[in-house]
Each structure stands twice: as structure tokens, then as C-alpha cells.
Amino acid sequence: MSNVKILGFAGSLRQKSYNRAALRAAQQLLPQEASLELFDLAPIPPFSEDEEKTPPAAVTEFKRQIRQADAILIATPEYNYSIPGVLKNAIDWASRPYGDSAWSGKPVAILGASAGKLGTARAQYHLRQVFVFLDMHPLNKPEVMIGPAADAFGADGELKDEKTREMIRKQLAALVQWTRCLKQGLP
Ligand code: FNR
């Protein structure tokens, strides 16, 4: 397996989102033979089970890109000690209808930036719980928890903090290795 294709998305629609900025930084910190495409969750409407068998075009495209990717990278904010509705909504869409989830068997890494010192730790562990039912393969370490985000990013949205950049670099390298490892294990 040569190039590892990673699909990344952030659970924030905010223009100056730190989590979206963290994904842009990640694009500069990839190991060789890996690529990172970003998907914007903004066009994904609220989920309704009535529409799951005739999903809107944005959801069909999201599922297509997930299936094409070798691995997933999620940048989650923390809202009220958990994951934002925007992120859960997108995950739910791509998991349906039952038996047609796009997530099964995908390696996934999480990073997150928040205003608080714990840097999305609580949200990240909620997200890991969701991965259990989705049958995803989360990377355990390194964890990337960026907080307070305002200390790590400049006003221009650039990730300035060198230690954080290094953690993301290490996480991406580990995700690529984990993805290769899982692929090799398949018959
Ligand atoms: C927050 N914020 C927040 N921060 C945190 O560390 N723990 C939390 O539980 C919460 N809860 C929370 C709830 C809601 C509804 C909002 C809007 C915000 C602050 C949050 O970390 C901050 O707004 C980040 O900047 C959000 O991420 P983005 O949009 O910059 O990616």
C-alpha cells in the first residue's frame, strides 16, 4: 500500500474555528506517502430517519468520500463536555440506513481544540464510545488535545505552538502506520 488517503473533517462550522485551523495545519504535517482531503460538514442537514434511504446529495458525497478514504481524521470541539451536534449529526447520517454504514472498519484518529485547559478531552472520550458501535478502529496514542486554543493559534488562524505541531505530526505518522497495519491484517 503506497499512498494512505486520509479524510478529515471538523465538528465546527465557525468561520474562525480552531478545529478547522488544526486540520489545515495537519495538511502541512503529513508523513510522506499520505494525503489529507478535508470535507466541510456545512451542507449536511439535520438527520431524519424518514430520509435515510433517500439522503441529500451532500450526505451521499460524504459517504462516498469516507468509503474512498483509507483512514479518517476528526477534529472535534467540546460543547458542554461532549461532542457538538453538528459532528454527531454527520456521523449519524453516514452510519445509516442500518447495514449501509460508511464507517465500518475504518481507522480513525481524533484531535481537538477548545477554550478550556483540557483541550476537548471529555468530548474525545465520548467520541471514542461512538466508534464502538460504528466498528471503527481508533488510534489510541498520541492523543492531541489543544487547550486553551487561543494560546496555540495566532490571530491569523495559523497553528503557532511548536509542541502542538509536533504532536499532530506524530499522530499523523502513527495513523498512517496503524492504517497500514490494519490493511495487512486483512485476508
Ligand atoms: C463551548 N466551549 C467549551 N469549551 C470547553 O473546553 N468545554 C466545553 O464544555 C465547552 N462547551 C461549549 C458549549 C458551546 C455550545 C459552545 C459554543 C462553546 C468553548 C469552545 O471550546 C470554543 O468555542 C471553541 O473555540 C469551539 O471550537 P471551534 O469552533 O473554534 O473549532
Image (cartoon, rainbow, N blue to C red):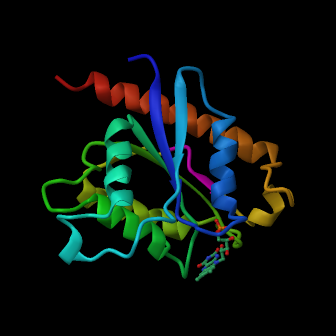
Q: Quadrant of residue 171?
A: top right
Magenta region, residue range? 141-145
Q: Quadrant of residue 132?
A: bottom left
- Residue 140 place in picture, x, y as percent: 45, 46
Magenta span has 69? no
For the question of whether residue 126 can be seen, the reply is no
Q: Quadrant of residue 187?
A: top left
- Residue 16 place in picture, x, y as percent: 73, 65
State the predominant SS element of the stretch in magenta.
loop
In what quadrant of the picture does the N terminus appear? top left
Which residue is rendered at x = 22% and y = 62% of the image? 96
- Residue 162 place in picture, x, y as percent: 80, 43
Q: Residue furthest right?
A: 155
Magenta span has 142? yes
- The vertical placement of 43 against 71, above or below, is below
Which residue is rendered at x = 22% and y = 72% of the image? 51
For the question of whether residue 92 can be seen, the reply is yes
* Foreground of the two, 12 or 170: 12
* Foreground of the two, 72 or 173: 72
Q: Residue furthest left?
A: 99
